[in-house]
Amino acid sequence: MSLIPQILRSLKNLPPFPMVAQRALLLVNKAEVSIQELVDVVKFDPAITANILRIANSAYFGLRREIHSLNQALLLLGTQELLKIIIASGATRLFGNAAPGYFAEQQGLWRHSVSCALMADLLARELTLAEGNLCFTAGILHDIGKVVLSLFVDQKFAQIMEVVEVQGEPFHKAEKIVLGVDHAEIGGEMARIWDFPDRLRQVIKHHHLNHPESLGDEMVLLIYLADLLVLMFGQNLGREGLAYAAYPEVLNRFNLKERDLEKFLLHFGSLWDDAQVFFGLLGNDHGLQCAHRG
């Protein structure tokens, strides 16, 4: 029997998406964002303002002088870096809980989301994607559906894996067969409820290329590729990672060869080492988890 009615009822208990992060989402893909616009977004959220200053002064950015004000941070780091910090600060509040249906460790979903965001950002710069500013945000939010679907997946995990192993289906298709819906579709519905920009909602909904039209969408393809490369990197596999569908045509779409993927993975490795402190993934008190605790 389909669990869709029960799953949809659970969406009614969604916490609100943090207002500051939601306002920041509206600025991500603007051609130009003024310093005043960003100040207006964060000035009434002292936790995020403190987080921005703490992160701006961290070794991750390696600035030579200490930053004491929001305006100073904006001037030195730039609006796009600050938007990433704001959105990630909001996202960590969503991903702070365990997702047992997908990851054994407490921070598994957050780690995967961060790594995919970093890879998407790297790919967007390397491939000069027209909508590059949105790729980090799409990467960090692409799996939000797992926040809701995790407990249902955990309950039905044996059945899902039977579909994977016997029918040879990728994990997200097995989800849909067993539960009646997959995490990408639920993520798209969450994005609608939270009034995300439509472009972002579409990327979240289609990031597994489960609709034919998604094969013509550059950003959807890039988020799919980022997800796949993170799995190839060998980090944050989770329970889903070993049953992931591969679409060789994505490499052709970006004119990529195996050596290009190796270069991306090498570059990502150095980024990941630094970013784990920045995003609070090493059990310290200096990353984005501070915003969650506050």
Image (tube, helix red, strand yellow):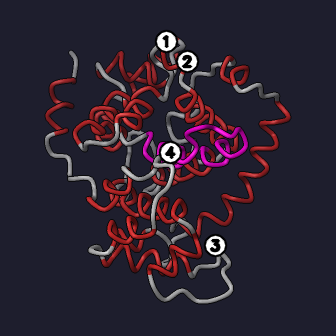
Q: Amino acid at mark 2?
A: Leu
Judge depth for marks 4 and 3 and give the one in front: 4
Judge depth for marks 1 and 4 and give the one in front: 4
**Residue bounds of the magenta highlight:** 120-142
Residue at image location 22% in from the left, 39% down from the top: 193
Mark drawn on residue 215: 2
Q: Amino acid at mark 4?
A: Leu
Q: Mark 1 highlights which residue?
A: 212
CA–CA distance between discs 1 and 4? 22 Å
Who is closer to the viewer here, 183 or 124?
124
Who is closer to the viewer here, 60 or 164?
60
For the residue carrying disc 1, how many other residues have a C-alpha within 10 Å: few (<14), some (14-19), or many (20+)? few
CA–CA distance between discs 4 and 2? 18 Å
Do tag 4 and tag 2 residues touch (Cβ < 8 Å)?
A: no
Residue at image location 51% in from the left, 49% down from the top: 31
CA–CA distance between discs 3 and 2? 36 Å
Q: Amino acid at mark 3?
A: Tyr
Secondary structure at badge 1 equals helix
Judge depth for marks 4 and 2 and give the one in front: 4
Q: Earlier in the sequence, mark 4 or mark 3?
A: 3
Do tag 4 and tag 3 residues touch (Cβ < 8 Å)?
A: no
Q: Going by the image, does 116 lie left or right of 28?
A: right
Q: Mark 4 highlights which residue?
A: 134
Say which quarter of the image contains residue 292.
Answer: bottom left
Location of residue 22 with respect to 192 vertically, above or below: below
